[in-house]
Amino acid sequence: SAAGPLAIAAAAAAGGSVGPMGANIFVFHIPINWTDEDFNAHFSPFGGIVSAKIHVDPVSKASKGFGFVSYASPTAATMAIKGMNGFDTKQGKFLKVTIKKGEEQYNPDAVAAQNVPVAGGVGGPGGASTIVGVQPTVALGPGVSQQALADAAQKGKMLKPGDMLPPLALQA
């Protein structure tokens, strides 16, 4: 029928559907050629999706490179962070997947999962073995640079490489 799952998902997303507290995630560094269908396909294996939308420019409809997935359960959101944070898109980008701002206290497992260093994250590509020295700083420190990045992304600001140098220099 014309009202297939995608039409229903689009209608749900337009209505601002979200999952329960702790079941909603942000995804950054999405390749701009991914469609909502691609986005859905990558995140649906982790659990029932209420809505999954890539943010687009309202005028040009061009992808803004980030999106939101709302799951039916916080467990699915945690699994998605574990499975997709640091995912290599094979386009020079590694996905960054975090719990929705303000929902951290509802899903501490997700917060723990998103703070694990991954490829394309704090230590750069190469996997966990190359960034062992950074892990304690990220796990124990305030995580200023990651937070600054997340805050800026949420406000739609672009951080220039120079913006991140002082905190990184202090950690080194």
Image (cartoon, rainbow, N blue to C red):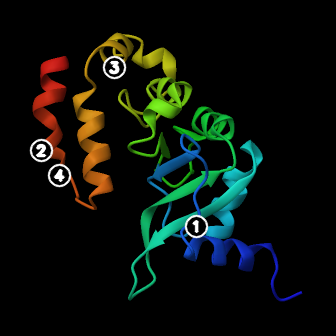
Who is closer to the viewer here, 47 or 19?
A: 19
Residue 68 seen in the figure: yes
Residue 34: assigned label: 1
Q: Position of residue 145 (x, y in %)?
A: 24, 33
Who is closer to the viewer here, 126 or 86?
A: 86
Q: Is residue 107 above or below residue 136?
A: below
> Would residue 68 appear left or right of 141 to someone viewing this image?
right
**Amino acid carrying mark 3 in the image:** Val
Q: Nearer the viewer, mark 3 or mark 4?
A: 3
Q: Are marks 2 and 4 in contact (CB under 8 Å)?
A: yes
- Quadrant placement of the N terminus: bottom right
> Would residue 46 appear left or right of 104 to someone viewing this image?
right
Q: Residues within 10 Å of mark 4 (few under 14, many from 20)?
A: few
> Of helix, strand and loop, which one carries label 3?
helix
Instruction: Kindly report the distance in space between the C-alpha atoms of the residues bearing marks 2 and 3.
Output: 20 Å
Q: Are marks 2 and 3 in contact (CB under 8 Å)?
A: no
Residue 152: assigned label: none
**Amino acid carrying mark 1 in the image:** Trp
- Quadrant placement of the C terminus: top left
Q: Position of residue 149 (x, y in %)?
A: 27, 44
Q: Are marks 3 and 1 in contact (CB under 8 Å)?
A: no
Give the residue pinned by disc 3.
138
Give the residue pinned by disc 4.
160
Q: Position of residue 168 (x, y in %)?
A: 19, 27
Instruction: Kindly report the distance in space between the C-alpha atoms of the residues bearing marks 3 and 1.
Output: 30 Å
Residue at the spot 27% in from the left edge and 47% down from the top edge: 151
Question: Which callout, 3 or 4, points at the residue further toward the start of the chain?
Answer: 3
> Of helix, strand and loop, which one carries label 2?
helix
Give the residue pinned by disc 2.
162
